[in-house]
Image (cartoon, rainbow, N blue to C red):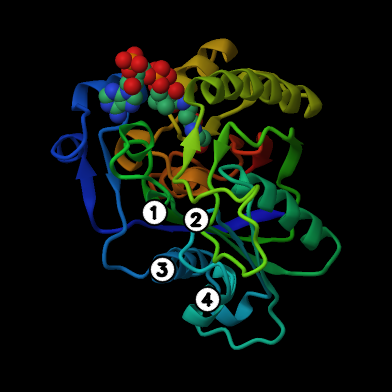
């Protein structure tokens, strides 16, 4: 595969830490020092599917294509008002792609969804099943949070990033992992009770729960390990990588990974300060910004690495 266009979209409302401390027992000082986050965009009266479609339209435009050139749509998504129909089908409708020759599907691999889906795109393109794939990562995690709980709600933001990928030999190496650890980050959908329930074993609805410190430790150790592995698999040195696009959950996590790797700060772009944790959208948002600012250029070696609920990780290197 190769990436031929990128795009992104953010909700219009930007919320500062001080705005949160008006109704939560928190402070700008705590949030900034523990996470690096200063502001985040939060969905208000926009329709989430419109935001995802906007990012998609920008990526198609940047690729020099029109919507009807797209023959497969994949959407990475954990949080979405619609459980069904799936978001990629709504995006298809929003773009005016009539089908039927354009399959659509969503993948849910938590914050790692974009990296997993890029690997999937490579498989679909190399077997000739698709020619121009639209991959959108769109998330509204702020809807998962209990807004009376300072532990989680201060961390997240909403947003969408998209790429168009077509056939090419950009992907240099990739490592995806999954270890079943259901308690470290968990959110269950509210479900209607059936008349057959006994009540036993049925969990009451809970907002997002997270074992922050455990996730922090696993994130640093797994990303440091995976990054060194994919670099070695590619026959490269860490110094050969031009840009390390890490999942943006916490600036301290990324700083610890960077220190383990002994690489300079300018190779690690960040957006968590402005956008919070946007789950699987965080890496495509970084990518789009880096390309638009002219920092990520053709021929550069770009490493992407993410971790998330599961516990899952995904790391890949591509030549942009
Ligand atoms: O996309 C992947 C998803 N998740 C992550 O990557 C999260 C990884 N973990 C983290 O980023 C960090 O663990 C957190 C930012 C979530 C928490 O930072 P921490 O340094 O691990 O703090 P902590 O959870 O150990 O809490 C320290 C204190 C506690 O008070 P006490 O018990 O020491 O009195 C918390 O109640 O900070 C308190 N606290 C807060 N105080 C002010 C927790 N949240 C807040 C808050 N404002 N928003």
* Category of crowding for the residue at label 1, using alpha-carbon neighbours closer than 10 angstroms: few (below 14), some (14–19), many (at least 20): some
Q: Is disc 2 in contact with disc 1, using a CB cutoff of under 8 Å?
A: yes
| Quadrant position of residue 111 | top right
Residue under pointer 3: 54
Residue 101 sits above or below residue 138 on the image: below
Q: Secondary structure at mark 1?
A: helix
Q: Is disc 1 in contact with disc 4, using a CB cutoff of under 8 Å?
A: no
For marks 2 and 3 on the same chain, the one whose residue lies earlier in the sequence: 3
For marks 2 and 1 on the same chain, the one whose residue lies earlier in the sequence: 2
Q: Quadrant of the C terminus?
A: top right
Q: Is disc 4 in contact with disc 3, using a CB cutoff of under 8 Å?
A: no
The percent position of residue 283, horizontal first and vertical second, equals 51, 43
The percent position of residue 14, horizontal first and vertical second, equals 23, 49
Residue 95 sits above or below residue 271 on the image: below
User: Of circles 3 and 1, which is in front?
Assistant: 1
* Distance of label 3 from label 1 (alpha carbons): 20 Å
Q: Secondary structure at mark 3?
A: helix
Q: Is 202 in front, or is 166? A: 202
Q: Is disc 3 in contact with disc 1, using a CB cutoff of under 8 Å?
A: no
User: Of circles 2 and 3, which is in front?
Assistant: 2
For marks 4 and 3 on the same chain, the one whose residue lies earlier in the sequence: 3
Residue under pointer 1: 143
Q: Is disc 4 in contact with disc 2, using a CB cutoff of under 8 Å?
A: no
Q: Which mark identifies residue 90?
A: 4
Q: Is 276 in front, or is 231? A: 276
* Category of crowding for the residue at label 4, using alpha-carbon neighbours closer than 10 angstroms: few (below 14), some (14–19), many (at least 20): some
* Category of crowding for the residue at label 2, using alpha-carbon neighbours closer than 10 angstroms: few (below 14), some (14–19), many (at least 20): some
* Quadrant of ligand 1 in image: top left
User: Of circles 4 and 2, which is in front?
Assistant: 2
Q: Which mark identifies residue 79?
A: 2
Residue 180 seen in this snapshot:
yes
* Distance of label 4 from label 2 (alpha carbons): 15 Å
């Amino acid at each position: 595969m190769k990436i031929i266009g990128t795009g992104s979209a953010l909700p219009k409302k930007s919320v500062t830490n001080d705005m949160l401390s008006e109704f939560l027992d928190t402070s700008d000082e705590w949030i900034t020092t523990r996470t690096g986050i200063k502001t985040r965009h939060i969905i208000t009266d926009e329709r989430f599917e419109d935001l995802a479609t906007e990012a998609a339209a920008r990526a198609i435009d940047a690729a020099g294509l029109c919507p009807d050139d797209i023959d497969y749509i994949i959407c990475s998504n954990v949080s979405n008002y619609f459980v069904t129909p799936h978001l990629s089908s709504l995006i298809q409708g929003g773009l005016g792609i009539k089908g039927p020759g354009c399959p659509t599907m969503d993948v849910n691999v938590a914050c790692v969804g974009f990296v997993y889906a890029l690997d999937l795109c490579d498989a679909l393109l190399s077997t000739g099943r698709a020619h121009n794939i639209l991959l959108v990562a769109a998330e509204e995690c702020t809807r998962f949070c209990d807004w009376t709980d300072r532990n989680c709600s201060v961390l997240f933001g909403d947003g969408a990033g998209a790429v168009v990928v077509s056939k090419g030999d950009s992907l240099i190496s990739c490592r995806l992992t999954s270890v079943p650890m259901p308690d470290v980050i968990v959110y269950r959908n509210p479900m209607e009770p059936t008349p057959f329930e006994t009540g036993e074993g049925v969990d009451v609805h809970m907002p997002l729960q997270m074992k922050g410190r455990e996730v922090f430790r696993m994130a640093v150790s797994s990303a440091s390990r995976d990054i060194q592995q994919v670099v070695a698999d590619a026959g490269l040195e860490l110094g050969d990588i031009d840009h390390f696009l890490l999942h943006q959950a916490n600036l301290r996590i990324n700083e610890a990974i960077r220190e383990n790797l002994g690489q300079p700060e300018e190779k690690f772009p960040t957006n968590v300060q402005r956008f919070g944790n946007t789950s699987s959208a965080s890496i495509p948002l970084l990518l789009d910004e880096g390309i638009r600012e002219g920092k990520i250029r053709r021929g550069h070696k770009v490493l992407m690495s993410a971790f998330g609920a599961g516990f899952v990780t995904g790391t890949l290197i591509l030549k942009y």
